[in-house]
Each structure stands twice: as C-alpha cells, then as structure tokens.
Amino acid sequence: MEYNFRKVEQKWQQYWAKNKTFKAENPPKGDSKNVKPKYYVLDMFPYPSGAGLHVGHPLGYIASDIFARYKRLKGFNVLHPMGYDSFGLPAEQYAIQTGQHPEITTKTNIARYREQLDKIGFSFDWDREVRTSDPSYYKWTQWIFIQLFNSWYNPETNKAEKIDTLTPKLKGFGTLSEKEQSDLLLEYRLAYLSDTMVNWCPQLGTVLANEEVKDGVSERGGYPVERKLMKQWSLRITAYADRLLNDLEGIDWTESIKEAQRNWIGKSEGTSLKFKVEKSDAEIEVFTTRPDTVFGVSFVTLAPEHELVSQLTTAAQKKAVEEYITFAKNRSERERMADVKKITGVFTGAHVIHPFTGKQIPIWIGDYVLAGYGTGAVMAVPGHDSRDYAFAKHFELPILEVVAGGDLSKESYDAKEGKLINSEFLNGLEVKEAVKKIIAAIEDKGIGKGKTNFRLRDAIFGRQRYWGEPIPVYYQGGIPKVLDENELPLVLPEVDKYLPTETGEPPLARAKDWKYKGQYEYEQSTMPGWAGSSWYFLRYMDAHNDKEFVSKEAVEYWKNVDLYIGGAEHATGHLLYVRFWTKFLFDLGLIPVTEPAKKLINQGMIQGVSSFIYRINGTNKLVSFNLKKDYDTTPLHVDVNIVNNNVLDLEAFKNWREEYKNAEFILEDGKYICGSEVEKMSKSKWNVVSPDVMVEQHGSDALRLYEMFLGPLELSKPWNTNGISGVSNFIRKLWRLYHSGEQLNISDEPASKPELKVLHRTIKKIVHDIENFSFNTSVSNFMICVNELTELKCNKRAILEPLAIIIAPYAPHIAEELWSQLGHKKSITYAEFPEFNESYLVESAFNYPVSFNGKTRFFQEYDLSLSKEQVEKEVLTLEQTQKYLEGKAPKKVIVVHNKIVNIVV
RNA sequence: GCCCAGGUGGUGGAAUUGGUAGACACGCAGGACUUAAAAUCCUGUGACCAUUGCGGUCGUGCGGGUUCAAGUCCCGCCCCGGGUACCA
C-alpha cells in the first residue's frame, strides 16, 4: 500500500484541532521563572474576499508556519495567530449591489477561508483569532482613536503626551470660549478635525489616503480622483516623521522596504528664505535645499493656490492670472500627472527684491509648484534646477550660472558639486562650504533659517463608507467630542442602503435615530481600512481581554513580533501606520516597544500561467499550438484545470462550456497542445489554481513542500503545477524508508557512521536554511538525505526518528504519522529538534577544520614544509608538492580537492 | 529621471559567501518490468570537439581589472523586474 495522504492528513488535522496542540500560553501572572523564551511569528492577516484563496496566498503562511513549528521544536513558546482584516470595500460594494449586509458576506467568506486554511495544516492558535469588524475588537480600535484625540506631540520631550500637559503652556487658554478652546486644541491633537485638501473619489463616494491613490486613480477600482477641500479627521503622523525615519536603522527589514519608507517620509534639509515684495509689506517665504544658488535666482514661482496670489497680482495681469487659476483648478490630478512635461504658468506682474543683490525679480505662478509642500513657493534657479530650467526656457526667462561645471545651453546643472561663480561673497567656494556661509548670512539678516521639511503628510482618517469602524465622536454645539471609554464600542448602526444619501452625506447619515444620548449628531464617517490592522499584532497577545486592549503582563511577555511575513505592497501603507501606532502607544506607556516587528520578510507573488486555445476565426474549429501558424486564429483563455502539461483534456473541455460542446479540433500527434503565458492570477484569465485542488490531488504536505521548493520566498514566480510530482515522489520515498509493503519496518540497531553522516549533514544544512529563510534549498536537502538513506537501505530508528523531527515543520502530517507509528504518544510538536554534531562529518584523521583567512573550513591539512615562493605562483598536485617538500620544516598547506591552493605561514 | 532588487542549462533554481559552477527537481532521451498503459526503478542530459576507454576546449548579460583561484570582489556599460515621481 502506498502512503495514503488523504487519510493521514485528515487524521492529524482533526487531532491538532481537538487537542489544541498549537495553543500558546501566556505565562501565569507574576511568574518570571521557568518561562520558556517567547517567539512571535505573525502573518499579515488576510482580507476575506469572495474569491477564496488561490495557491499564491498561502505562500507566506507556509513559510511562517515552518518557522513557527521549527521554533517550537527548538524549545520556544511560540505565538502564531491568525485573524481577518474584515472591514473593507468589496463586501460593501457587494452590499450596495445586492442589499445584503456586509457582515453576512464577511462571515461567509471567513468560513470559506478557514476551511481552506485548515486543509493546509497550519499551526495557528485559533483561540486567539481576531476580526477587525467584530465590535469586541473595534471597541479597542475606537479606544486607541480616543487616546490619539486626547494626546498631543510635545516637541520638547519628543513624545506624545496627554493633552492636559499642553493647556498650561497655551497663554490665555482659560479665557477662551469653549469653541475657541476646542478649535485651538485641534491644532495639537494627534487625531484632529481640519479643513484639508483631500483625494476625493466621486465614484466611490469617499476620500482616499495618498497611498490609496495610484497615478491619479483609486487603487481599488481605478476610478478618477480629484482634489477637494473637506472637513476631515486626520492623524498627525507627521509628528513622528523623524522617529519613523531614524528607527528604521534598528530593524531587520529588507532594504527595499526601508528605502520605500525613507522616500515616502522624504526628509529634506534646507533653509527658509523670505523675499520682500516690491512696493508692498508682503513677504514671500520659500523653502530651498540649495541656498548656495541664491545668486542664481531669476524669478520666484508660487503655487496657484498660494494665499498671496490675489493680493500680489497687478491690475494688468489680473485677467490672465484668474484664467490661469481656473484652468489649474479644473485640471484634475490625473491630467496633471499624465502630462508632467506640459509647462503652464502665468506672470503676476509683481516683483520681489533679491535680499542680497537688491535686484528686481519677477513673481510667476506655475502648477509645478505644489501648495502642500514647503511654503507653496519656490525661488527659481533655472541654472541649477531642471524644473525651473524647463519653466525658464518655456517662458524665456533668464538663466544664470552660479555653480561651475555644467553646460547651461543644454540643461541645468543640478549636481551638488563645483565652485561657486557670479555669487559675490560666495565665489570660489565649494557647494558644501557655500551652503554653510549663505545660511549664516541669511540668519544674520533675519530673513530665514535652517529648516527641515518632510514629504510625509498627515494621514486622512475619515472615510465616507459604511463598512468600517465608526469614529467615536459626537458633535455638541459644533464642537467635536469623543465618547467616554465606558460607552464603547460605538456599534455600527443599521441602515436601509449602503450608499451615500441623495444629498451626498455618508451612508451612516441614513441610520435612524442614531444620536448620542438621543440628541447629539454622531460623526458620520468611518475609519479607513488600515485602522484595525495598525495594532492587531498586540491584540493577539490577549485576544479576549474585555478590560484593556492588551494586558500589561501579556505585552511585557510577548513584546513585539519576532518574525513578520507579508507582501511588500504594504511598504508605505500598513507598515508605516503600524509603526506609527506602536510608537504612540509606547509614548503613553501602554506597551514596552517602539517597533511592531523586529524582522520582516516580504514573500513574492505567485503569478498564474494562463493556457490558450486557438480558434480559427469565423469557425468553431480549434487548432493545436504548433499548427496555428497556418491559420488565422484568435487566442482564447482556457481553464488551466483541464490542461495538463499543455495538453488539453478534450472530454473535460467539451463539458467545460456549452459553446464548445460541438467544437472540432485540429490535433498534432493526436493531442491538442495549448499555448501559455505568465499573467496575474485571476478568475477572468482562467488561470487560478486553488489550494484545495492541490491538496485533494497531492496532499497538503506536497503542496507545502512544493510552494517552498518553487524558489526563494521573496521572489515572484509563476505557478507551475507540473513540478509537484517531484515532491510527491519525495513523500512516498520517505514513507518507504520506514515501511516495507504495509508493515512498519524499523530496526533498533545503532546507526552506522555513514548513516550518521547523512543525518548530521542534513541537520546542519536545514538549520542553516531555516535560519536564513532559504526554505527552497531545505526541500532539496531533504530529498538528498532521503535518497542517500534509501541507497544505504537505512531503516534505523536512530536515524529515522530525528529525521521525522527535522521534516516536521515542512511536512507536518506525514511527520506526525511516522512519529506516532514509532510509538510516541505526544505530538511531534513537543519533540526536541536534534542537535547537530560536527564530529560525524569528519571523514578521516587527515580531515579537520582549518582556520584560514578568518574562516573555518574542512580542508585537509598536511604538515609539510616548503618555501612560500616555490608554490606561490603555481598550483601543484598533492603528489608533486609532497615530492617538493621532502625533508623540509613543517608548514601548513591547504589542499582542496587534491590540489594545494594556499600555504599558511 | 531617481531609488531598490536582479541577470547562472530547455525550465524552476543550487553554489557552505573568494575554493571542483550547474546541487535538487521538472522536462527530455534511452533502458528494465508489463500483452499494453500507468506507477516504479536504472542510465544519460551546459555547449562544442573526441568518442573502442580513460579525455580536451569554452562556459554564470557585455568589456576591463584584482587574485594561485571570481557566478561571488573592484571599475565601466547593456538588459529585465519592482517602487516612486514636478517634494524645490
């Protein structure tokens, strides 16, 4: 009998669930002795979409599961939880279309996800499951929002503090009216209401955060996005910009994610500088990173939205400026992005006085200057800034050279090196020195000072949607007030429809009699998708606590995530927000860590391989791939599940769709060969491979091994089911090592030297692989190990028992089965990972470790003597060298593969 | 444009980080078993040359360099992928 994976896998999955094998215990209160070291392995929890999982989704979960199981075997108390990020747009859109409550859709989808996840045999502690849409969870999301509302960022202590430490610092605060006090405090609170330019998406009827907008359209749905001024809740993430940037140094995340966050935060150090407007008291303040080029300023450009525009514009230019501003306003964000190269602008008619030369400088308006960054105004130095250069060329403005080294007739010279020229007291200085000198001069004159700007904007927190956490705020006399903690959760009210109202208010405005204490209006927007995911890693530590978001004991023990696995697409979204909230909660003394995850691994995407059939145009005839060149054909997607090795299953195909029932085929060698192409895995491309089908056909151990075997975890790669036979063979070979026929066939004899060598080499490699997250190579190493043991006809318990343990993280079902057949009563989860013993790897007395160039290797070491020069330039064979060295004083000679490669003197 | 990560057989990918390049697997070819097929097992498989036998030459995107030794380190190019983009 062959290995029956269906029976075995089902058996152990039921066993694990029944015995709660993977339950992670928080240590008992006050007991600091005898606690196992903790290890926290976290996956980015999924949004439960209606489509279910495809084979790409579990990739990261399999990797984290292997690591979690490995750490348990290494004696750690492992926290490995799973939950659902269950607020989100698809459920809401489905609700809009069908009228079905999103909660029902969500529950159905979660049930399906759970079923699929269970089949793969993950070692999650399901007792700690969280769902962000569950009131017992979002109660605490709302609670954290209230803490943000009640806090401000104290620049002196460089941390968030309760708002009551601020009020004594505000002069005359007590004399203000309640409304004035509220308005003033909103300028400091970390969660605040303000008039903000937002990304408004009319089709979705909501605002979007910057990272939810890609190329001027919404990331979800691809609808156009426009700029709009709205009263909105925001979170003051900018207060944390410096810490978010600096703390990247201390965490083990991939360089590309860190770099993406650095760019997103976009710290730039420069100088503010005021230009006095001619014949006016007004001043234009600009921000520049190149104050050294100040003598190259030939005009000043304002953003169209700049507050001084109307005041400055001369009567003669009034009409032109107004027209331009209307034009700029109506030009949507998308158009602006699409034709970046199109240069537009208008002259105001006004001038500023150059602070150093006293010359008259024209003031222009241009939409290449962004209102939201810096001061919304720039000093234009066309000689040394490519955008100013393009603008100057277009409007025929003067271009001055102040840093030597470029050729300004062709392009601007933007490099920060070279000697200053045409710059009075800066002449002859290098750029670096010139920057220092000019900043000193600017500060002397009192017209500016050194300043740091960030690209990062505050995060818009309100969404005009139904399916999200209600923001726990009500309005009393126009003053926003947060609910009391004991009034939480503020439960999402029922509505008749999930659409905005006819007057454009959010869906929550439809809720009947939904008022605080029956009289005050609640805030009608809900929180964005990332709210719940910004702290969920903490909730798993203490998932059922109804007194606190997490208990002190739990968080003191689990601290933060040791290994976090998830997609790189969250680089500037979730991964930035979760760091922000972690730092905030730390500032309030609620948690002991400033970063959510010590190590982060980004798994790659698994793409689909689509199959194509070729229909001869105008007929119902299908021609095989290699013959299609003789016909005029249209390629059509065909379901990859009825294609095997590019060969179409004709019977299955005829039943696949009604229209192909009577299709005719032009075959080659009696087969219909399909074409193929790598694309994103999606339903519409018929290239979705479901993990359920893989588990059904090959078993979950095979699926797990194969997903790892496919290539490095972090790489994106196409799914190709063909190769799975390799790992299936491996599983059967492993089974055969322990069995002859149906009988367990195990010998209690002691292991031989060669057998021990195979085992220990494997242990060494696997430990190295796992700790470096090279799960793909460990699968190969298992195969080599089993092949070698098969060759040695090894059926010894002394080898097979430890082998089962080291394979267990990868193929847990077969490992459990073998373990129990070997007579163990407890799950292999509680076994101990075998210790590696290097001595088994030493082959002979001649072969021992040699330290060489600071590294230890297993080379042969011979005591020989030889003058360095003799072998220095020549690689000799061992025999030749030995002849050379007769009778000389002993020296070490490094020999690799029978050739002397180096001499240690 | 800028930033990041890559480029190794027909394919996915190894290479203990400077030490026999191509592990392992897929695919392909040949063989054994079988009436036959499936399954299983064995052999071969970077290219070119030599093949009655041990062999030889080239080879990790391209061009240089360092080294006894380079896929790996240095310099200069080329190409693919990802992120980001008027951020002054």
Image (cartoon, rainbow, N blue to C red):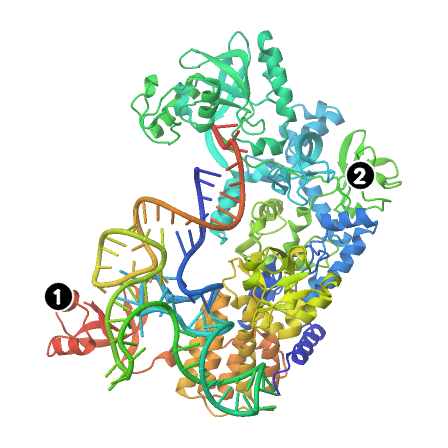
Amino acid type assigned to the residue bearing label 1 in the image: Glu
Residue A117 sits in which quadrant?
A: bottom right
Left or right, A286 with respect to A496, comes to left
Q: Position of residue A360 (x, y in %)?
A: 45, 10
In the rendered image, the quadrant that contains the C terminus of chain A is: bottom left
Q: How far separated are the C-alphas under marks 2 and 1?
A: 87 Å
The reply to whether label 2 and label 1 mark residues of one chain is: yes
**In terms of depth relative to the viewer, which is nearer, A477 or A155?**
A477
- Sequence order check, earlier mark of 2 and 1: 2
In the image, residue A514 sits, relative to residue A600, either above or below, namely above
The amino acid on which the numbered mark 2 sits, given as a three-letter code, is: Pro
- The answer to whether residue A894 is seen in the rendering is no
Q: Of residues A654 and A730, which is closer to you in this image? A: A654
Q: Which mark is residue A500?
A: 2
Dot 2, how many residues are within 10 Å of its Cα: few (below 14), some (14-19), or many (20+)?
some
Identify whether A670 is placed above or below A348.
below
Q: Is residue A630 visible?
A: yes
User: Relative to A817, does residue A534 appear above or below in the rendering?
Assistant: above
Image-quadrant location for residue A382: top left
Q: Position of residue A554 (x, y in %)?
A: 64, 59
Say which chain tag 2 marks: A
For label 1, the residue is A869
Q: Nearer the viewer, residue A433 or A782?
A: A782
Residue A460 is tagged as none
In this rendering, the answer to whether A52 lies above or below A667 is above
Tell me the quadrant of the picture where the N terminus of chain A can be found. bottom right
Q: Position of residue A530 (x, y in %)?
A: 66, 47
